[in-house]
Amino acid sequence: MLSLDFYALITEHSKIPAAYRTLSFMSGEVIYNSEGEGLEETNQATSIKLFPLYLNPRFISDKTLVINKVPQKKITGYAIDIKDTNNIENFLAQEYSKSFRSNIRRLKKRLETCFTISYRMFFGSISQNDYNDYMNELHRMLTIRFGQRNENNDILNNWDFYFNTTFELVNSKKASIFVIYENNIPIYICINHHFNNILFVSIPSYDIDYSKFALGNISIYKLLEWAIDHNYSMIDMAYGTLEYKRRWSNLIYDFEHHILFDKNQWKQRIFSALEIKKIQLKNILKHYNIDDIVKKIKSRRRRQNSPDITHQVYYNIEELHNFSTDNISVVDIYKSHQPGLKQMVFEFLYAQKAHIKMVEIFKTTTSGKYVIKLKDRCFFAKITSN
């Protein structure tokens, strides 16, 4: 039996299995027909997982083709269904509450108040040198981020595939790379895949020192702005539950598993029946949360067998009323190797609503102790880590 991942095919390869004649949104808007870049036909029984249910499939006309659809439990996708609009502010007012809109504007303004921020979307053109730099930086961000969460990550496990394929996809407008810069230094990088008028947010990551600034929310805002300007119908933020996805989604969807076989082929009938039973059994186990128990056991084993590459950092900041430059020296936080220093300073900027150029950081003779000078005010800061 041939096994296919529909979601991976449409995103990472811009391909559709041959049995699908058309794909359309539930509104009726057709986004694919079999004259597009479908996969070659096969005479095997085919198991196709992760078909998103915001799409309505129409299959090829074949009297011998049998199609079984089985729900895939506990896999939830998140998307933004873009209504007819050419203005992001109108769309936000139409789809989101006043408090949500105010919070997004506040987050974006706070980031741009504290740093010199710029944004760039690479779509249709990127140099090899730029591509290598951004992909290497994204890999570093992902490694640190998932090390911090102590989670296994399929992207990192298959990094060579993404590195070797994404360059051509970006230059052929089947993928894009979105970057947020702080003073021309990437602090957020996201690989997106494109199929017709759907933008798939596929591989995002960020510099964890900027965690306070909710870069994921700001990225979705900028991607939504770009998608509206380029007449896209949907932003698909993929499956996997995260808080910012829930808040942005106006379409939460499920997945189906499609099993296709030739009813005149007895071997295909047997293999397909077994495949259906296997999927149904998985759904039963998920109903009783057996999958969650397995995940916890695997996570515990990873913690035991893998070194922790991150450290929990704690800090305390108190205002000073007397300040002397004796026995202290100016420190460049971007070159410092002190764990947690950048995070501490950036969270200080967030709280003070101050730009990075407005502060000076001084290092004392005692390890982990600093003085932060903001205009005519000074603060004593102490960093500790486990």
Image: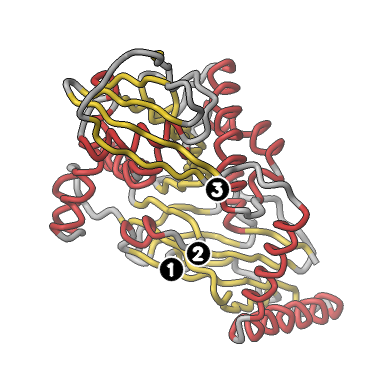
The tag earlier along the polypeptide, 3 or 1, is 3
Q: Amino acid at mark 1?
A: Tyr
How packed is label 2: few (under 14 Cα within 10 Å), some, or many (20 or more)? some
* Left/right of residue 133 with respect to residue 350 in the rendered view: right
Foreground of the two, 225 or 54: 225
Q: Which residue is mark 3?
A: 11
- Classify mark 3: helix, strand or loop: helix
At horizontal 48% and vertical 52% (from top left) the residue drawn is 32
Foreground of the two, 138 or 8: 138
Foreground of the two, 344 or 36: 344
Foreground of the two, 298 or 171: 298
Q: Which residue is mark 1?
A: 253
* Left/right of residue 100 with respect to residue 365 in the rendered view: left
Quadrant position of residue 300: bottom right
- Classify mark 1: helix, strand or loop: strand
* Left/right of residue 282 with respect to residue 192 in the rendered view: right
User: Does residue 106 lie above or below 244 as drawn?
Assistant: above
Is residue 193 in view?
A: no
Please tell me the numbered disc located at residue 52: 2
Q: Amino acid at mark 2?
A: Pro
Residue 21 at x, y percent in the picture = 55, 60
At horizontal 50% and vertical 21% (from top left) the residue drawn is 336
Q: Amino acid at mark 3?
A: Thr
> Disc 2 vs disc 1: which is toward the camera?
1
